[in-house]
Amino acid sequence: MAEQSGTTSGSGRFENFGRRVDEQVENAVPRIEEDLKKLIAWLNDEVVPEVRRSSSKGLRTAAEQLERLAAHLDRRGGSGM
């Protein structure tokens, strides 16, 4: 019988540990949600506009290069078609 009470005591400690972990996670969830909202706002306000600016600059650079290529092909007398 001593083994059984030791086992019960061990599982009781485990249950208490589990409850404490659940409590800590439950207390952390609102903070995590708030941090995620801030992260999403930062991405939308700071990162996305910069990516768009960089993308449009990249497209302009590509367009300039294509214009140069087209002019080069025109000078050579061939359009490739």
Image (cartoon, helix red, strand yellow):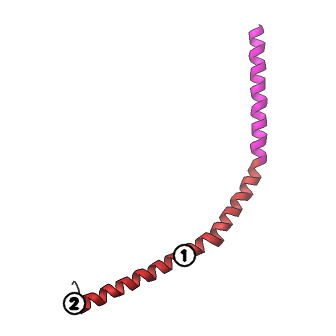
Question: Looking at the rendering, in which quadrant would you find the C terminus?
Answer: bottom left
Q: Which mark is residue 76?
A: 2
- Residue 10 is inside the magenta segment: yes
**Which quadrant of the view contains residue 61?**
bottom left
Question: Looking at the rendering, in which quadrant would you find the N terminus?
Answer: top right
Under mark 2, the amino acid is Arg
**Which quadrant of the view contains residue 2?**
top right
**Which quadrant of the view contains residue 3?**
top right
Q: Position of residue 26 (x, y in %)?
A: 76, 45
**Marker count (numbered):** 2
Q: Secondary structure at mark 1?
A: helix
Mark 2 and mark 1: Cα distance apart in space = 36 Å
Which residue is painted at 74% across and 27% down in the image?
Answer: 14
Q: Is residue 25 above or below residue 3?
A: below
Dominant SS type (magenta): helix
Under mark 1, the amino acid is Arg
Magenta stretch, residue numbers:
1-27
Q: Is residue 24 above or below residue 54?
A: above
Single out the mark in the foreground, 2 or 1. Answer: 2
In the drawing, does residue 36 fall left or right of residue 77?
Answer: right
